[in-house]
């Protein structure tokens, strides 16, 4: 049967076979390219998600370290302020003259202002009602020294339950958590 074909028909058939092979190879290559592109884009998205999650985790860890550091600093500040406050109370207990007590009261009020403790709720009322108490202490008699010292110790020890500055709204971390 092939012998019956002319040379031109044989060449035509051969060209058609070659063209069909090229078309099949091109379609196969296109299918492979589409599959590779889909796989590549999926892998890229997965890698980007993984990287974003890794960065979020690092950010969370850094925030936890910062928060732990802030908590430690806050605790150290509380301890320091408590020790200083107790020192004022001991000074009031050990005062032998009304003038010493008045000077101690002035120093205590200055200490509270220096540490921004006058804005705490308990301390605000004390500042309003007892601001000029040292003037009365200087005028009082030695007989009332122990009563005044005990009253001052009570005021000092009850000043501010937390001994920290009042917060001015949410912190940066709290704002991030609210979002």
Image (spheres, rainbow, N blue to C red):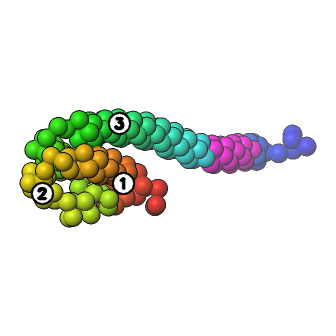
Q: Find residue 9 and report its horizontal and vertical position in percent.
A: 76, 47
What's the magenta bit mostly, secondary-structure-wise?
A: helix
Q: CA distance from mark 2 to mark 1?
A: 42 Å
Q: Is 102 rendered above or below residue 127? A: above
| Residue, disc 2 | 136
What separation in Å lies between label 2 and label 3 (alpha carbons)? 32 Å
The one of 130 and 150 positioned closer to us in this rendering: 150
Residue 42, how many percent across, how many down?
61, 47
Query: How far across and how far down the image is residue 86, in percent?
Result: 30, 38
Do residues under tags 2 and 1 come within 8 Å of each other at their CB atoms?
A: no
Name the N-terminal-most of marks 2 and 3.
3
Secondary element type, mark 3: helix
State whether residue 110 appears in this view: no
Magenta region, residue range:
15-40
Residue at 38% x, 38% y: name it: 75
Q: Is residue 87 above or below residue 24?
A: above
Between circles 2 and 3, the one closer to the viewer is 2
State the residue position of label 1: 171
Q: Which residue is mark 3?
A: 79
Q: Is the C-beta separation of discs 2 and 3 under 8 Å?
A: no
Work out whether residue 157 or residue 123 is closer to the camera in this orientation and state it. 157
User: Which disc number belongs to residue 68?
Assistant: none
Q: x and y percent of residue 33 in the render? A: 62, 44
Residue located at (47% from left, 56% from top): 177
Residue 87 visible here: yes
Circle 2 SS class: helix
């Amino acid at each position: 049967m092939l012998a019956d074909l002319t040379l031109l028909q044989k060449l035509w058939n051969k060209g058609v076979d070659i063209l069909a092979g090229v078309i099949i190879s091109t379609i196969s290559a296109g299918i492979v390219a589409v599959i590779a592109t889909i796989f590549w884009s999926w892998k890229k998205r997965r890698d980007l998600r993984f990287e974003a999650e890794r960065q979020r985790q690092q950010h969370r860890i850094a925030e936890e370290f910062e928060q732990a550091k802030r908590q430690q600093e806050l605790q150290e500040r509380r301890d320091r302020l408590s020790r200083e406050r107790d020192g004022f109370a001991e000074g009031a207990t050990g005062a032998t003259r009304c003038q010493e007590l008045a000077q101690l009261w002035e120093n205590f009020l200055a200490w509270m202002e220096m540490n921004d403790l006058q804005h705490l709720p308990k301390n605000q009322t004390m500042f309003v009602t007892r601001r000029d108490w040292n003037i009365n202490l200087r005028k009082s008699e030695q007989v009332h020294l122990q009563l005044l010292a005990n009253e001052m110790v009570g005021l000092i020890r009850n000043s501010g339950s937390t001994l920290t500055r009042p917060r001015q709204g949410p912190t940066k971390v709290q704002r991030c958590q609210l979002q």
